[in-house]
Amino acid sequence: MRSLEELTPTETLEIEENGLALVSRVKLCLTIHPVVPSVSKPIDEWQLKRSLTDFLKNSVVPSVTVAEEDIVVRRHKDLKKRKRDEPVAHGSLFIRDLGFLEGKKRKKKDSDENDGEIDVKELEKKFIDWRKVLVEKMNGIELNLEGVKYKLSVMLPISDDFERLKKDWEEFYAFGHPREARREADTIILRGVPSRWFAEPRVSSKPSMLVTHTIFSSFGKIRNLNVAEDDDLGKDADEDSGDLVSGLHCKIVVQFEKYNDFVNAMKAFCGRSMQKEGTRLKADYELTGDKIGFFRNSRRALDHRDGGYRNESFGYNQDDLRRKRFRNNEMRSKGTWEM
């Protein structure tokens, strides 16, 4: 895998293990209110999507193309019970084609040893400036849908803004919980990635600890790792949202040994979707840092559970993985496998 320090915000990052890739995109959160608060007419989803795609194509410079399936709209469940200040709908818009931002690449000069680094910084600034202008231009526009006017509110989620993410974890660990020891951030949390992408082929559809460890080791040395089916994902989603049912996704928690590896991993996953070779599906996962002391709390729970025996649902540390890999290699040679 290429150097993460040289990764530009518009580049696809190929993860050599398991055929996975992190594909650049911009996610915008949408909130739609009627201009007249008393309006209770259901919003026309198709008209809304068409209005947004037309606006991005004709009113934004440079023009932006968005596929209809990349606009997700969730309407208010019961408009009759909606309060006057509540939106009639909310959703997300994904811009996946960012090639127009790259422009022409400069030729590297022999006398300029840091030319690649300068290019990355220039493109990062260009990308951030363009994204800021886009949000400002879209936020507050009025949409006329079948004779009814709606006001659109647009914001960039913190999970897609690396500088805000970094400021958030730095402030938390500098002025966070008084009982927490002073330390640096080191743990990332991913939710909403397909379980089968982290499973062992022809063995199980459930996420594998060993496969997940192999994939995330490409970002740096891992101290602790947890992977489990994300049963809470289905509970958090709206009933009529159309999201995939619970059990198909997993939640991954990775604690790195070095702070720089954590930072590079956060930057790589921020503002990207996950895609697997051979499929067009893109997983728009949720990315956060750890503010609850996941592994410390897990160890405390283990100390008071089952007489102190380790419960595998809490994950493994580095030594656990080495022992398990040795056992599995032994069983492979004997024609057996430990599940």
Image: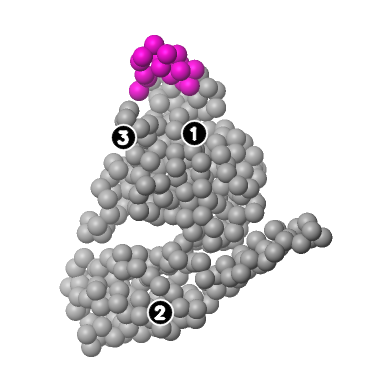
In the rendered image, residue 114, in percent from the top left (x then y), is placed at 75, 58
Residue 311 drawn at (x, y percent): 40, 25
Quadrant assignment for the N terminus: top right
* Residue 175 location (% of width, % of height): 62, 52
Q: Amino acid at mark 1?
A: His
212 w.r.t. 303: above or below? below
Q: Quadrant of residue 232?
A: top left
Q: CA distance from mark 3 to mark 2?
A: 41 Å
Specify how the rendered protein is coloured. one colour
In primary-sequence order, the first of circles 3 and 2 is: 2
Q: Which segment is the magenta one?
A: 324-339
Q: Are marks 2 and 1 in contact (CB under 8 Å)?
A: no
The vertical placement of 249 against 77, above or below, is above
Mark sitting on residue 213: 1
Q: Nearer the viewer, residue 37 or 187?
A: 187
Q: Tag 1 or tag 2, which sits nearer the N-term?
A: 2
Query: Amino acid under label 3?
Result: Ser
The Cα atoms of the two marked residues, 3 and 1, are separated by 16 Å
Say if mark 3 contacts mark 1, CB within 8 Å. Answer: no
How far across and how far down the image is residue 260, in percent? 65, 45
Q: Which numbered disc covers residue 205? A: 3
Q: If you read the primary sequence from the N terminus, does the residue marked by circle 3 or circle 1 appear first?
A: 3
The amino acid at mark 2 is Lys
Q: Residue at x 33, y 75 (%)?
A: 32
Residue at position x 35%, y 23% from top?
339
Could you tell me if residue 111 is visible in this image? yes
- The disc label shown at residue 57, or none: 2
How far is the residue under mark 2 from the one under mark 1? 42 Å
Q: Secondary structure at mark 3?
A: loop
